[in-house]
Amino acid sequence: MSHKHKVIIEKVFSHPIASNIDWKKLAATLEHFGAKIDVSNANRAHIILDDAELILSLPHHAHELTNKEDVTKLRHFLEAQGITPDSV
């Protein structure tokens, strides 16, 4: 695993909740852990990891996730799959 992947996971789990997570780096990190990501025309990312699913709203004009509710959902999703800063 790359140091960059670990940094992204740590950012997802940071306190206070990060509101500037780069989507492309996050997608690469999730794919590294085996996630399948489908992005719809409506800027929604459908993430599948170990039979669990999550749908995130993607930024329309920016490159960063800024919605703290989506980051919180992502955090809980990753925790349920056993991906935390301590486990990577």
Image (cartoon, grey):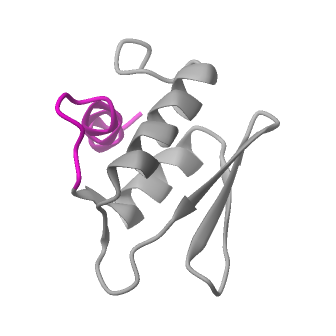
Find the magenta span and give its range.
1-19
Q: Residue at x 76, y 33 (%)?
A: 50
- Residue 72's place in the image compared with 46, above or below, is above
Q: How many marks?
A: 0
Q: Of 6 and 61, which appears nearest the observer?
A: 61
Q: Position of residue 36 (x, y in %)?
A: 70, 54
Instruction: Give the left or right position of residue 33, taking residue 26 as reference.
Output: right
Q: Residue at x 45, y 33 (%)?
A: 75
Q: Residue at x 33, y 38 (%)?
A: 12
Instruction: Give the left or right position of residue 40, taking residue 33 as reference.
Output: right
Q: Residue at x 60, y 71 (%)?
A: 44
| Quarter placement of the C terminus | top left
Q: Position of residue 38 (x, y in %)?
A: 69, 68
Q: Position of residue 9 (x, y in %)?
A: 35, 35
Does 3 appear in magenta?
yes
Q: Of 9 and 59, which appears nearest the observer?
A: 59
Task: Tell which residue pokes out farthest to the top in this image.
Answer: 86
| Quarter placement of the N terminus | top left
Task: Tell which residue pokes out farthest to the left in this image.
Answer: 16
- Residue 88's place in the image compared with 30, above or below, is above
- Residue 62's place in the image compared with 57, above or below, is below
Does 69 appear in magenta?
no
Q: Position of residue 80 (x, y in %)?
A: 62, 21
Task: Tell which residue pokes out farthest to the right in this image.
Answer: 51
Instruction: Give the left or right position of residue 55, taking residue 50 as reference.
Output: left
